[in-house]
Image (cartoon, rainbow, N blue to C red):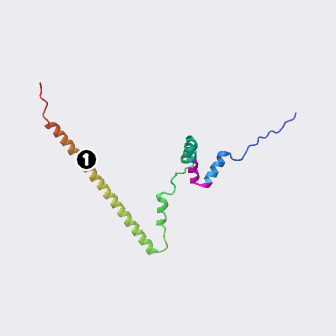
Amino acid sequence: MMTTNTAMTYDTRPGFFARTEAWLDARGKGAWIAAMVLGFIVFWPIGLAILGYMIWGKGMFARTSCKKADWSMPMTKSSGNAAFDAYRDETIRRLEDEQQKFEAFLKRLRDAKDKAEFDEFMNDRERKAAATNMTPDAPQT
């Protein structure tokens, strides 16, 4: 009995879509946007598919560099100059206090505006109710 070796071979080259994605990635966001616009011009579902892939598949619009911890960490590091570090720490503390006071002021301002609007609403409501009660009743027959 004779057996033959039928080993399966797989094509390891990337397909058309993988090559296109790599080509667009190498050229940056502008290439992706241009491809999306061209997709909309050629056939709108293609443009829509590229837009969906850009938003959900690529994480193109993910916000990674805007974290508060990213910019606040270096300020706590010592510069090596004790006088400057003390000045910097005092200035940061003073600015944080001013920010808290300003936010409290804005809250008081918003609360006062809300109260004034509510009082005006209640006065208008009372005026309308008084005007409704002052109108003479229609003659009864």
Locate residue 53, reporting x and y percent: 57, 45
Q: In this figure, which residue is indicated by the disc labeled 1?
A: 118
Which residues are the magenta region?
A: 26-35
Task: List x then y, in percent, for residue 25.
Answer: 61, 52
The image quadrant of residue 92 is: bottom left
Residue 36 or 80: which is nearer the viewer? Answer: 36
Q: Which residue sits at x=65%, y=47%?
A: 18
User: Does residue 96 sit above or below 113 in this rendering?
Assistant: below
- Residue at screen point 71% across, 47% down: 13
User: Residue at point 14% right, 36% down?
Assistant: 135
Residue 7 coordinates in the image, percent (x, y) = 79, 40
Q: Secondary structure at mark 1?
A: helix
Main SS category, magenta section: helix
Reply yes or no: does residue 29 show up in magenta: yes
Kind of residue sitting beneath label 1: Phe
Residue 96: x percent and y percent?
38, 63
